[in-house]
Image (tube, rainbow, N blue to C red):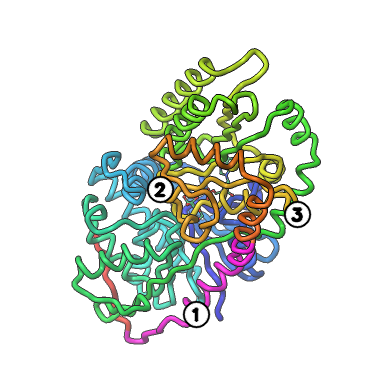
Amino acid sequence: MGRLVVVSNRVPLPSERGAKAGGLAVALADALQPGSLWFGWSGRRNARGSAVTHVQRSDGITYATVDLTEADYHSFYVNFSNGALWPLLHYRLGLIDFKSEDYDGYRSVNRQFAAALQPLLRADDLIWVHDYHLIPLAAELRGMGVKNRIGFFLHTPFVPPDIFHGMPRSVELLTNLCAYDVVGFHTRGYRASFLDCVAETLGIHPDPDGRFVWRGHAVRAIVDPIGIDADSFAACAREAAKSSDARLLRESLGRGALAIGVDRLDYSKGLVNRFQAIGRFFGNYPQHRREISFLQVAARSREDQGAYQRLRRELDQIVGDLNGRYSEFDWTPLRYMTRAVKRDTLAGFFRISRLGIVTPLRDGMNLVAKEYIAAQDPNDPGVLILSRFAGAAEEMTEALIVNPYDADEVAEAMHIGLSMDLEERRERWQALYDKVTGSTARRFCTVFLNHLGHADLQPERPTLRAIS
Ligand code: ADQ
C-alpha cells in the first residue's frame, strides 16, 4: 500500500495535544505509521487564510496545516458545517440555518484545502478524508487532476432521503460523495440511508455490497464501526481508579453509588431529556434518593453558536430546578460540570460508577458507551443505559436500551440498573466487553484501508468537475 494521507478538519498537532489526545488521534494511532501525512486546519484564524502551509514532524509523521480567514471560519466552520450540516445529519431539520453565502464559504474552503494538499501528494498515496466538513474535497481534488484512491468516513449518522433533501444543495452534496472511491459509515442503517438517497436521487441501484457507478466512477459504500483501544483503556481505568481524584470522588459520595454521563455539550447528546429523566427517576422511585448521585461531565463545545448558548442556559435551569427540588443538606442528586476532564481521570470515574448513562437523541457511534464498558471492574461491573439512537446500539444490545425521549422509560432503566443482581450485571458486561474488544480502533482502520487499498483504480477516470 502507498503512503497514508489523512485529512480532517482539525489536525491534532503534537505540539498542542498534551495529555488529552482527541478521539480521532486515538482511533488512527495504529494506522499512522512513520511516513504518513496528516493534513487539515491548524485551528488558527488570520488574514492570510490558507495561503501558507505550516509543516511539523513528530514520530516520523508529517502534520501539514493551513489557517482560515475570519470570514471562512464563520461561513465554513461555524455556519455551514456546524450550523447546517450537523443538525441535518442528526435529524434536526428545524435547527438548520442555511444561507447560500455560508455554503459558498464551505465550498471555497474545500477548494482551498484541495489546492494546498495537491502539491504535497504522491501518485500512490491513499487519501483518507474524515467527516462532514470535507464532503466536497474529493470532487475538488478530482477537478485538479488527482487520480489517487480517496476514501471518506462519516463520523455522524446519515439520514434518509426525506430528511436529506430538506437541506438546500443536497444533490450537490450527494454527488460530491460519489467522487470518493470508498464511503464509510458506522452502521448498516446509515449506509442504507445513503444508498437510498443514491437510488432515489441519482436513479442508480447499488448492488448488495454497496457498489455502484456514478458517471463512470466506481464507488463503494461500506459499514465500518469505529472502536476504541479497549485493552489500554481498561488498563488506564484500573490505574486511574486508584488516583486521588477517584478517591476524592468516592469519598464525596458517602455510602451512595455514582451514575455518570460524559458528553460534549451538544443538543444531539440529549442532555435536556436526560436531566428530565433523572428528575422523573427521583420522583417515581423515591427509595433511591440519597442512594445515588449523578455526575454529568459536559465539555463546552461550539460556543459561538446560538443553539449551543440556548442549550447551556436551558440545562443550567433544569439542573437548578432539579437540585432545588430534591437536594438534602448533605446530598446533591445531580452534579454538573461544563469543562473537559482528562481521559484517564474519566476512565477512573467510569470504573467506580454503578450506572453509565449514554442517551443521545442521535449519535454516529458514541465512544463513551464503549469506554464505559472497557473501564469496568469484571468482578463488579456497572450497567450501561444506552439510547437506541446511538450507532453503538446496533452492536451493544446487552446494554439497557432506551428511547431517550421517554423520561419514564429511562427512569425505569435507571431503577432496573440499580437493582440488577451481580450475576446479570456480569453476564451483560461480559457480552458487551467481548464486543468492544472485538471491534477496536485498529480493526476500524484496517477494514477501511483494506477497502480503499483495493478500490478500483481507473486510469481513464473521467474528471469529476467540482460543482460550484
Ligand atoms: P463526538 O460527538 O465528539 O464524536 P463521542 O464519540 O462520544 O462523540 O466522544 C468522543 C471522545 O471525546 C470520547 O473519547 C470521549 O471520552 C471524549 N469526551 C466526550 N465528552 C467529554 C468530556 N466532557 N470531557 C472529556 N472528554 C470527553 C463524533 C460523533 C460520534 C462518534 C465519534 C467517533 O459525533 O458519534 O462516535 O465522532 O466517530
Q: Which residue is mark 2?
A: 362
Looking at the rendered structure, the secondary structure element under dot 2 is loop
> Measured from the top left, where is residue 442 in percent x and y?
61, 67
User: Range of the magenta residues?
Assistant: 434-460
User: Which quadrant of the figure contains the N terminus?
Assistant: bottom right
The amino acid sitting under disc 2 is: Arg
Query: Mark 1 against mark 3, which lies toward the viewer?
Result: 3
Amino acid type of disc 1?
A: Gly
Please tell me which residue is depicted at 57% across the width and 48% down the height of the picture.
368
Residue at the limit of the structure toward the bottom, as seen here: 459
- Amino acid type at circle 3 is Ala
Q: Which residue is mark 1?
A: 453
Nearer to me, 306 or 334: 334
Q: Is residue 169 visible?
A: no
Check disc 2: other Cα within 10 Å, few if <14, some if 14-19, many if 20+.
Answer: many
Of residues 391 and 131, which is closer to you in this image?
Answer: 391
Q: Earlier in the sequence, mark 3 or mark 2?
A: 3
Res 235 label = 3
What's the CA distance linking mark 3 and mark 2?
Answer: 30 Å
Pointer 2 with pointer 1, Cβ within 8 A? no
Is disc 1 placed on a helix, strand or loop? helix
Q: For the residue labelled by badge 3, is the local secondary structure a helix, a strand or a loop? A: helix
Foreground: disc 2 or disc 1: 2
Query: Does 301 sit left or right of 97 as displayed?
Result: right
Q: Residue at x 70, y 44 (%)?
A: 351
